[in-house]
């Protein structure tokens, strides 16, 4: 689209010359011959830039400049005058003028400054739009649900977001722990500062310390340059430590020290720097049990657990599933073209509501995406959801058809639960009410027997 430029000059010949020149270079140019008329037109029509004379009757260039910049601070205004002076130029710049040209000037000079001004305006508008998108995406509106647990969660986030207190978010995998952390950040006073997320499981233990605290050059093999850690990157903002239960005990000690004194020392460094970084930690494990098992420091646990937020699994807020399904449908449809899928039949939606969703909201989202990408009909039907039953029938159903020992029934039930949760032993252990080590020992014994 052509950039729209408004030329304002009570000298009709001058205004016409400028308009003709700029039009030759592809600008969409409008002309007004007085400040009052220009101000009225700018209120009616959008412009990308304004070029105005300084001395005009009724409303002069400085008054027009002030009114335009007050209405739109990103609008570049270039002033022209035949009566140039340092004092006037300084006054114009202070009021928000992008540039100040003294007549006579070369037309090429005006076009150079105009091109530069429009480029900066485009970037400013894009950044503003991006900030708006980020804020909307990670606002409370991204946490979909009207159930009692979700209403309670909204209230908690709104209160917590206004503080700098440490937050510990717990819940099963796929419940949206990072989304909650982002909602806390983007709805609080740190919203314009960085939000940095680190998955403590995804980074090898030997590199996690450097990732958190940074390192100096030569601190270890491969450290050819120094780099800041995420604590420094998130200075003034929020650092989200996901799956903190998987952090080594040694590294927990360093983290505790930083949380207590706010100082960060890079790996291999000799000095520390102070950071102002809010911490939101998350885990799908039982940290209290890890403390009892001496796998997590008790003092760090109490330091992190200032504001605990427990996310409910999707099966405990089934009434939110239709809302979530429709939300994901709209989001996926916006980026997947050509799919005829536009909704769900009542029976299909009932199947979605009754499913246990071991992968929680994340599993539902991917399920809806699969239905849209592979769908061939306008409405999703029950037959399209057969893959949700792929984990097989309950072992209790098998027990009604054949007699088996209690040990065999127990073994089948454990295997069935593991299938339901995608092999996640920590989650399966939580459902079964046993320690995860029990499942690992059982698996090892089974392997030894098979051998």
Image (cartoon, helix red, strand yellow):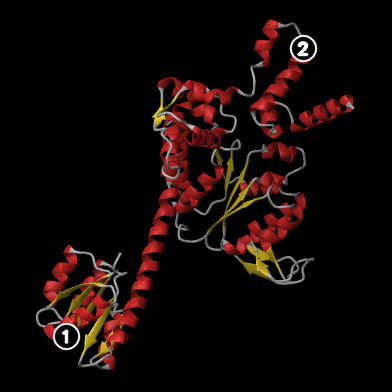
Q: Position of residue 372 (x, y in %)?
A: 47, 35
Badge 2 crowding class, 10 Å Cα cut-off, few under 14, some 14 to 19, many 20 or more, is few
Q: Position of residue 394 (x, y in %)?
A: 65, 16
> On the rendered image, what quadrant is the N terminus found in?
bottom left
The reply, left or right, for residue 8 in relation to residue 257 is: left
Give the structural element (helix, strand or loop) at label 2: helix
Q: 128 or 24: nearer the eye?
A: 24
**Residue 48 showing in the rendered view:** yes
Instruction: Return the residue at label 2.
Output: 406
Q: 363 or 231: nearer the eye?
A: 363
Earlier-in-chain disc, 1 versus 2: 1
Q: Position of residue 222 (x, y in %)?
A: 76, 66
Question: Which residue is at a point 45% across and 60% down the rendered structure image?
Answer: 192
**Residue 62 showing in the rendered view:** no
Q: 172 or 28: nearer the eye?
A: 28
Q: What numbered label is drawn on residue 14?
A: 1
Looking at the image, is 101 positioned above or below residue 432? below
Q: What numbered label is drawn on residue 43?
A: none
Looking at the image, is 300 positioned above or below residue 144? below
Q: Position of residue 124 (x, y in %)?
A: 38, 67
Query: Which image quadrant for residue 224?
Result: bottom right
| Residue closest to the far left | 58
């Amino acid at each position: 689209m052509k950039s729209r430029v408004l030329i304002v000059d009570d000298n009709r010949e001058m205004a016409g010359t400028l308009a003709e020149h700029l039009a030759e270079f592809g600008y969409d140019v409008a002309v007004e011959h007085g400040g009052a008329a220009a101000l009225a037109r700018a209120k009616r029509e959008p412009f990308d830039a304004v070029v105005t004379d300084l001395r005009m009757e009724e409303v002069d260039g400085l008054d027009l400049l002030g009114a335009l910049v007050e209405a739109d601070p990103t609008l570049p205004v270039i002033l022209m005058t035949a009566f140039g002076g340092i004092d006037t130029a300084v006054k114009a710049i202070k009021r928000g003028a992008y540039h100040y040209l003294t007549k006579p000037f070369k037309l090429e000079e005006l076009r150079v400054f105009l091109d530069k001004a429009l480029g900066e305006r485009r970037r400013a508008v894009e950044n503003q739009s991006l900030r708006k998108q980020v804020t909307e995406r990670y606002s409370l509106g991204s946490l979909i649900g009207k159930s009692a647990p979700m209403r309670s969660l909204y209230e908690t986030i709104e209160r917590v977001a206004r503080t700098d207190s440490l937050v510990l978010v717990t819940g099963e995998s796929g419940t949206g722990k990072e989304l909650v952390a982002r909602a806390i950040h983007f709805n609080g006073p740190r919203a314009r500062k960085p939000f940095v997320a680190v998955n403590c499981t995804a980074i090898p233990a030997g590199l996690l310390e450097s990732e958190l605290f940074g390192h100096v050059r030569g601190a270890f093999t491969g450290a050819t340059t120094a780099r800041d850690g995420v604590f420094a990157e998130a200075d003034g903002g929020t650092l989200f430590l996901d799956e903190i239960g998987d952090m080594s005990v040694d590294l927990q000690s360093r983290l505790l020290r930083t949380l207590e004194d706010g100082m960060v020392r890079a790996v291999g460094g000799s000095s520390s720097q102070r950071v102002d970084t809010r911490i939101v930690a998350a885990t799908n494990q039982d940290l209290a049990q890890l403390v009892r098992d001496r796998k997590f420091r008790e003092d760090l646990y109490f330091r992190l657990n200032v504001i605990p937020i427990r996310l409910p699994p999707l099966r405990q807020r089934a009434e939110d599933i239709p809302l979530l399904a429709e939300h994901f449908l709209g989001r996926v449809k916006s980026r997947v073209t050509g799919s005829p899928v536009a909704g769900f039949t009542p029976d299909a939606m009932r199947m979605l509501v009754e499913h246990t969703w071991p992968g929680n909201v994340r599993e539902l989202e991917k399920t809806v995406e699969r239905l849209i990408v592979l769908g061939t009909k306008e409405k999703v039907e029950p037959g399209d959801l057969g893959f949700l039953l792929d984990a097989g029938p309950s072992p209790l159903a098998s027990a009604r058809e054949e007699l088996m020992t209690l040990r065999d029934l127990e073994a089948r039930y454990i295997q069935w639960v593991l299938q339901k949760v995608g092999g996640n032993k920590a989650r399966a252990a939580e459902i079964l009410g046993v320690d995860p080590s029990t499942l690992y020992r059982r698996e090892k014994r089974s392997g030894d027997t098979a051998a």
